[in-house]
Image (cartoon, rainbow, N blue to C red):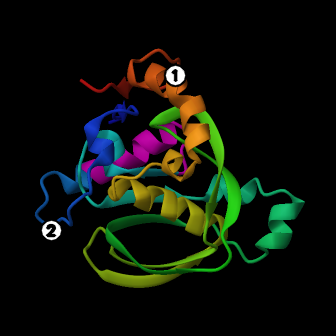
C-alpha cells in the first residue's frame, strides 16, 4: 500500500526513533509499504518517520542514482555499486573522509534542494528484516543516502545543515509545505 508522506512541520520528523524488536506490529507489511511508497514517489530512500512511524527503520535503493552518474561522478566513485537494502535499528559506528557537497532533496520537504556536505564514508551497525546483525562500510553516494535517511531516524532533516541565513530565506516555502500549499504527485500527511 502506498502510504502518505509526512510533511515538514509534523512532530514525528523531529523524534529520535527507538530500536524495535522482531515482534514490532506489522513489520513485514510496513517494510513492503515503505518500498512501494518510495518507488511510487521516485525516492531513493525512505525512513519510517516519513510515513508516520517513529521506528528505526529505513530503506535505500541507489540504483537509479548510480545508473545516472555523469563522467565526473564516475571518476570520483569508480567502484560505486548500487545498494538495495533495509536497515533496522541502525547506529553509526563512524564516519570518515572529506566532507563533500551534493544537492539533496527530501520527500517530506518537496521542491527544495540544497547542497549539503556529508562525509565520504560511513560504517553502520544494523539488523536486516530477519534481525540478523551486520556491520558494514558504505561510501560515496550510497553513504550519502544512508546518512540522509539515518538523520530521519535521529529526528534531523537535511535543512538543519544549512546556514541560518539560508534557513531564514526558506522559511516561507517551508511554511507553505507544512500548510499543504504545494503540489506534489503523492499524498502528504500534514501537521495537525
Q: How many marks?
A: 2
Tell me the magenta residue range.
Answer: 30-44
Q: Is residue 36 magenta?
A: yes
Circle 2/circle 1 CB separation < 8 Å: no
Q: Is residue 83 visible?
A: yes
Q: Residue at x 27, y 42 (%)?
A: 12
Answer yes or no: is residue 185 visible.
no
Secondary structure mostly seen in the magenta stretch: helix
Q: Residues within 10 Å of mark 1 (few under 14, many from 20)?
A: few
In the displayed structure, 74 sits above or below 178; it is below
Name the residue furthest front: 165
The residue that appears at 42% across and 58% down in the rendered structure is 151
Image quarter in which the C terminus is found: top left
Q: Nearer the viewer, residue 63 or 191?
A: 191
* Placement of 10 over or under 163, stated as above or below: above
What percent of the width, then of the height, locates residue 133? 31, 82
State which quadrant residue 100 falls in.
bottom right
Q: Quadrant of residue 144?
A: bottom right
Q: Residue furthest top?
A: 181
Quickly name the residue at label 2. Answer: 21
Judge the density around disc 2: few (<14), some (14-19), many (≥20) Cα neighbours within 10 Å.
few
**x and y percentages locating residue 179 in the rendered image:** 39, 18
Q: Indicate which disc, 2 or 1, sits on the residue closer to the N terminus.
A: 2
What's the residue at 66%, 70% (across, down)? 99
Asked whether residue 86 is drawn in magenta, I would say no
Residue at left 29%, top 27%? 191
Residue 107 in the image: state x and y as whole percent.
49, 38
Instruction: Name the element at disc 2.
Output: loop
Query: Which residue corresponds to mark 1?
Result: 172
Amino acid at each position: 500500500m502506498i502510504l502518505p508522506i509526512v510533511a515538514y512541520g509534523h512532530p514525528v520528523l523531529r523524534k529520535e526513533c527507538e530500536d524495535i524488536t522482531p515482534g514490532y506490529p506489522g513489520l513485514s507489511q510496513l517494510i513492503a509499504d515503505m518500498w512501494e511508497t518510495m518507488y511510487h514517489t521516485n525516492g531513493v530512500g525512505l525512513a519510517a518517520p516519513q510515513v508516520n512511524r517513529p521506528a528505526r527503520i529505513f530503506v535505500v535503493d541507489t540504483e537509479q542514482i548510480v545508473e545516472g552518474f555523469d563522467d565526473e561522478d564516475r571518476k570520483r566513485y569508480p567502484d560505486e555499486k548500487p545498494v538495495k537494502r533495509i536497515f533496522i535499528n541502525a547506529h553509526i559506528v563512524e564516519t570518515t573522509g572529506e566532507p563533500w557537497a551534493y544537492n539533496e532533496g527530501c520527500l517530506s520537504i518537496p521542491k527544495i534542494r540544497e547542497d549539503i556536505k556529508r562525509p565520504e564514508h560511513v560504517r553502520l551497525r544494523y539488523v536486516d528484516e530477519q534481525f540478523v546483525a551486520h556491520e558494514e562500510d558504505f561510501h560515496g553516494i550510497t553513504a550519502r543516502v544512508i546518512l540522509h535517511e539515518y538523520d530521519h531516524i535521529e529526528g534531523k532533516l537535511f535543512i538543519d545543515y544549512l546556514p541560518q541565513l539560508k534557513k531564514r530565506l526558506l522559511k516561507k516555502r517551508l511554511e507553505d509545505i507544512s500548510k499543504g500549499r504545494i503540489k506534489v504527485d503523492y499524498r502528504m500527511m500534514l501537521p495537525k
